[in-house]
Image (cartoon, helix red, strand yellow):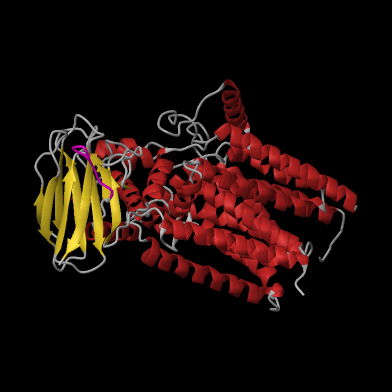
């Protein structure tokens, strides 16, 4: 027979366990330190360093919807210059495709995007501002399990130098 | 002491703890955020950790932030842990001395404690979680029920606290010691001094291993190599004293010059002018080759000039303890944090409270590092030498609390580069509890009540 005090212990443990499990299901990982990481099906962002605000998935730093030239995107990473983002490729792949742009919610700055793997520069965009459409890339990443996505302000200061990486997918 | 009186005192202490919680919550709402806290918050919200600040704290903050956005969640966590912990410790005093129990619960109101308890810092995380851990262990020692819950929670809290500072592991050993004395009989193991000491040392080592494994395999923070600031600080001093340029060229910034080093070294808050200011003479690095070079030079210089190194370390430690210089105390706590998304909002009542805390604190010995160090050292020695006279598990627990504060304080001898009073927050709590311990020991010896509980 379980006494009343033991029942309280069990109930408390059960409550903590169920709460944790619910949060894990909601955030898609059993490890609570992964709950805030940006994850996609085929890659994970393993490091994101930027000079202003935080990298975020599918929304701008103030919760803005990701739009480029009036078109909405639902598989994007919003960032801000100057940013270095490292992505880990979950499945070995030959090519990385996607686009980068200056998002619709920002005004007045210009940026340049770059993709680096190891010591090689795989892609370098034009100088992008609000008048530019999405710039697409399709680069060879065979043998690489880590790729660096860089965004730099094209001016002296970083004010309003937002950027988005959108529709990125791995291809063989 | 009658059970009725003990119960009344416990009610009074609970009231004081609730009031203290309320005052701190009002004063700091929604949580004071310094540039360091902001850096941790950034990591908490994007999930990419750096090891300059504790990644585990950022990970927990990130999880809490999902439910209570901003610093409020961490503020509530810290205040709840601190005040409930103080209440639990005071509860153990209540059976022995009413005034001492009130004195202990009032620890959280002491200017050097309340002045910082609402700032979301790793030091506050360490102090508040360890306060709750010791409270739970002391409660578990007396409890008839829920011991497994209390001891499990205490263990996790000790472990978490030890992750919050690079130099916290030595200070966790006495707490594991305290935990072992209560847990061993509970799981059916016979206790003896040797067994308890061995178990706590094994536990500390194993948990350190767990922490390293967790960091390497799970949290994976970006390595910032914080140890380089200590090496640079020491080398800057050697360079200044021996009139040589010992800092590797790769780690010099554009502002580097012997004059700049001398100016920075003369400031007791060395960390900021020497390392973090825009015109810092150093360029910090993450390049392991450069760091290996720096370490090699540092080791050579320490081996060549051990007395000079010791003098410099003592000087830094003395500054932190407020010896030979004006204490940095609380004057920077709220200033400069009035901008940004989590700015501290000034209201007449809050300003009055802030001023009262600061003004009272300046004149109190408990706001001086040397006094806190003296108290925890005295209690540690006193308890060790009188353990045969005042032999009780209660006193042993109080000794562990004092030892923990002492070890954390002493670890700064080798690690501090600035005289930031927040480093001493845990020592301030332990010193205040230790003053209660001292009075208790005197009371027991005076009344010749040489009890073995």
Left or right for B288, reference B387: left
B380 shown above or below A128: below
The spot of residue B19 in percent (x, y) is: 69, 37
Q: Is residue B145 magenta?
A: no
Left of A63 or right of it: where is B186? Answer: right
- In front: B364, or B339? B339
The mark tally for this picture is: 0
The magenta span reads A68-74
* Rendering coords of residue A103 (x, y %): 22, 38
Residue B171 visible within the image: no
Instruction: Give residue B446's position: percent from left, percent from top.
Output: 84, 53
Does residue A109 sit above or below B320 in this rendering?
above
From the top left corner, tell me how far across and down residue A145 is, in percent. Answer: 21, 65
Looking at this view, is B58 or B353 the one in front? B58
**Residue B38 lies in what quarter of the image?**
top left
For residue B412, say whether it is visible.
yes
In depth, the one of B244 and B297 nearer the eye is B297
């Amino acid at each position: 027979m379980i006494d009343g005090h033991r029942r309280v212990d069990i109930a408390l443990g059960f409550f903590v366990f169920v709460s944790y499990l619910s949060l894990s299901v909601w955030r898609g990982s059993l490890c609570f330190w992964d709950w805030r990481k940006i994850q996609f099906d085929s890659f994970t962002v393993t490091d994101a360093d930027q000079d202003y605000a935080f990298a975020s998935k599918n929304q701008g730093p103030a919760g803005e919807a990701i739009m480029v030239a009036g078109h909405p995107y639902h598989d994007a990473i919003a960032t801000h210059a100057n940013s270095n983002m490292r992505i880990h490729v979950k499945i070995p792949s030959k090519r990385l495709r996607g686009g980068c742009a200056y998002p619709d919610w920002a005004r007045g700055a210009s940026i340049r995007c770059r993709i680096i793997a190891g010591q090689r520069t795989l892609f370098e965009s034009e100088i992008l501002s609000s008048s530019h459409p999405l710039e697409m890339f399709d680069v060879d990443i065979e043998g690489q399990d880590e790729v660096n996505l860089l965004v730099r302000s094209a001016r002296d200061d970083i004010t309003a130098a937002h950027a988005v990486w959108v529709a990125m997918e791995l291809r063989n | 002491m009658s059970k009725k009186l003990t119960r009344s005192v416990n009610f009074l202490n609970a009231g004081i703890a609730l009031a203290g919680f309320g005052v701190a919550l009002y004063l700091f709402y929604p949580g004071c955020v310094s540039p360091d806290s902001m850096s941790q918050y950034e990591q908490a919200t994007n999930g990419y950790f750096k090891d300059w600040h504790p990644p585990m704290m950022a990970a927990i903050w990130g999880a809490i932030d999902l439910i209570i956005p901003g610093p409020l969640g961490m503020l509530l966590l810290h205040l709840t842990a601190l005040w409930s912990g103080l209440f639990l410790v005071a509860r153990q005093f209540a059976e022995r001395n009413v005034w001492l129990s009130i004195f202990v619960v009032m620890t959280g109101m002491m200017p050097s404690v309340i002045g910082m308890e609402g700032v979301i810092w790793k030091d506050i995380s360490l102090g508040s979680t360890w306060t709750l851990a010791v409270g739970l262990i002391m409660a578990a020692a007396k409890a008839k029920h829920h011991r497994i819950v209390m001891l499990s929670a205490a263990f996790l809290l000790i472990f978490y606290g030890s992750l919050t500072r690079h130099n916290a592991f030595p200070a966790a050993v006495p707490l594991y010691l305290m935990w072992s004395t209560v847990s061993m009989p509970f799981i059916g193991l016979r206790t003896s001094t040797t067994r308890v000491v061995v178990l706590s040392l094994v536990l500390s080592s194993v948990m350190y291993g767990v922490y390293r494994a967790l960091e390497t395999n799970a949290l994976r923070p970006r390595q910032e190599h914080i140890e380089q600031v200590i090496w640079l600080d020491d080398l800057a001093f050697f360079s200044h004293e021996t009139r040589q340029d010992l800092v590797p060229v790769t780690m010099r910034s554009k502002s580097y010059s012997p004059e700049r080093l001398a100016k920075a070294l003369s400031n007791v808050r060395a960390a900021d002018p020497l390392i973090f200011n825009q015109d810092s003479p150093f360029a910090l690095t993450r390049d392991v080759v450069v760091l290996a070079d720096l370490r090699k030079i540092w080791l050579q210089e320490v081996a060549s000039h051990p007395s000079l190194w010791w003098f410099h370390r003592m000087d830094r430690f003395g500054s932190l303890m407020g010896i030979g210089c004006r204490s940095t105390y609380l004057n920077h706590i709220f200033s400069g944090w009035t901008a940004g998304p989590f700015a501290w909002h000034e209201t007449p009542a809050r300003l009055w409270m802030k001023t009262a805390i600061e003004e009272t604190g300046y004149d109190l010995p408990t706001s001086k590092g040397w006094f806190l160090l003296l108290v925890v050292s005295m209690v540690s020695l006193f308890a060790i030498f009188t353990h045969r006279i005042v032999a009780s598990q209660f006193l042993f627990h109080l000794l562990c609390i004092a030892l923990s504060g002492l070890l954390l304080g002493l670890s700064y001898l080798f690690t501090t580069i600035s005289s930031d009073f927040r480093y001493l927050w845990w020592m301030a709590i332990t010193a205040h509890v230790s003053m209660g311990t001292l009075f208790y020991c005197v009371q027991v010896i005076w009344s010749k009540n040489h009890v073995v509980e």
